[in-house]
Image (cartoon, rainbow, N blue to C red):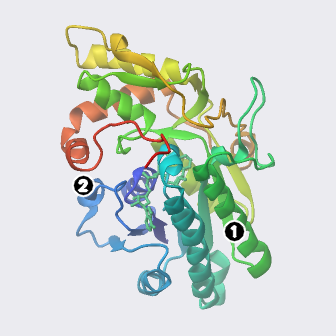
Amino acid sequence: MRLLVTGGAGFIGSAVVRHCLGKGLASIGVLDAMTYAASPRTLAPFGGRADFVLYERNICAPLSVRTALREFEPDAIMHLAAESHVDRSIDKPAAFVQTNVVGTQVMLDEALAYWRSLSDIRRARFRFHHISTDEVFGSLGDSDYFHENTRYDPRSPYSASKAASDHLVRAWHHTFGLPVVLTNCTNNYGPYQFPEKLVPLMILRGLSGQPMPVYGDGQNVRDWLFVDDHAEALWTVLTLGKVGDTYAIGGMAERRNLDVVNTLASHLDELAPCSTSRKDLIQFVPDRPGHDRRYAMDCGKIRRELGWSPKRSFEDGLRETVRWYLDHRDWWEPLVHKTYRLERLGGGVA
Ligand SMILES: NC(=O)c1ccc[n+]([C@@H]2O[C@H](COP(=O)([O-])OP(=O)(O)OC[C@H]3O[C@@H](n4cnc5c(N)ncnc54)[C@H](O)[C@@H]3O)[C@@H](O)[C@H]2O)c1
């Protein structure tokens, strides 16, 4: 299989690349604009391999996408390229509409033209896999769960742009026959995550003795999935999923934000001891505007129909993640020095 991964230099996309190349499942083409969220170091180990090629291109540029498709000749596309951080979407929503909505439309148009040019056998096998988020469904009460048929109710510029992209993908399937599959997944964590997101941000701030900011009362609940488990789920859906279907993916690990930060502080105290406890660094700060209260996913469909469930427990995965950041300063130090200084985002005042 020849798999083109958009956003393959980012956090989840690069986990897909490692999964596929590590297990010899596919030759990989990565199409990525190498925005602030991509680190060249993430894909460096694959440079020069015969089964790997990087196209540094923007998904919003039709001609760039078209030539990459013609050159790479994929059997499938996994579409992960996106602006992905809710807080940045509050400061600068336009980039989210551009990449997540217009970029997805460009990918669909170019994928459709490419798919139509294929032989009958290759056309029948081709898949366009759109990777999306549970955030498109809005916010839950205390006890219910999102599932594949939950009504869309996005509430941030990020989730609204992802919702729009989901609708476009379904429209290209129903109107033009493009063979698509879709997945909506809960919060990912693990190695190679850009430090703006909760888990790496808390690790790096705690490590350097800076306050560890918790939004609002810290009681917002997220479901957490280790990124390698997500990569395996994506491969499972790509290869076994039913055309036109959506699969909900989650870690079955609901945690309050404050509990996540407390656990990270404990791991840091154990793995990188210092004179005071990192728990003393935890500070409550004004809430994110429009902060959704709870996300949780019913993953019954993918478990029953495709046999996937997460392998890593949240406790093991979180500890492994802390250890990875401690052992990979060479990966995150250049980002923290040049790109993002661990400051608060999302005030809506840029
Ligand atoms: N991180 C999560 O917890 C999570 C959960 C569910 C779904 N998702 C979805 O998974 C996908 C990947 O998320 P992530 O956390 O790996 O994001 P990320 O921000 O780490 O990576 C995004 C990648 O897309 C690239 N990119 C951005 N704009 C581009 C453009 N215009 N053209 C080409 N490439 C571009 C970036 O350079 C980067 O490599 C996104 O679609 C996101 O909505 C993420």
Residue 249 appears in view: yes
Identify whether 172 is placed above or below 212.
Answer: below
Q: Position of residue 265 (x, y in %)?
A: 36, 17
Q: Earlier in the sequence, mark 2 or mark 1?
A: 2
The amino acid pointed to by label 2 is Arg
Q: Residue furthest front?
A: 349
Measure the alpha-carbon separation of dots 2 and 1.
33 Å
Q: Which mark is residue 168?
A: 1
Mark 2 secondary-structure assignment: helix
Res 205 → quadrant: top left
Residue 243 appears in view: no
The amino acid pointed to by label 1 is Leu
Q: Residue furthest top?
A: 276
The residue sitting at 43% across, 39% down in the picture is: 197
The residue sitting at 36% across, 33% down in the picture is: 201
Res 173 → quadrant: bottom right
Q: Is residue 93 left or right of residue 272?
A: right
Q: Position of residue 319 (x, y in %)?
A: 38, 25
Q: Position of residue 347 (x, y in %)?
A: 48, 40
Identify whether 240 is placed above or below 217.
Answer: below
Labels 2, 1: front one: 1
Identify whether 272 is placed above or below 175.
Answer: above
Residue at the spot of label 2: 41
**Label 2 crowding class (10 Å Cα cut-off): few <14, some 14-19, many 20+?**
some
Which of the two residues, 117 or 106, is positioned nearer the viewer here?
106
The residue sitting at 54% across, 28% down in the picture is: 287
Q: Position of residue 210 (x, y in %)?
A: 28, 23
Could you tell me how many numbered marks the image carries?
2
Mark 1 secondary-structure assignment: helix
Whether ligand 1 has any atom under 8 Å from the Cβ at mark 2 is answered as no
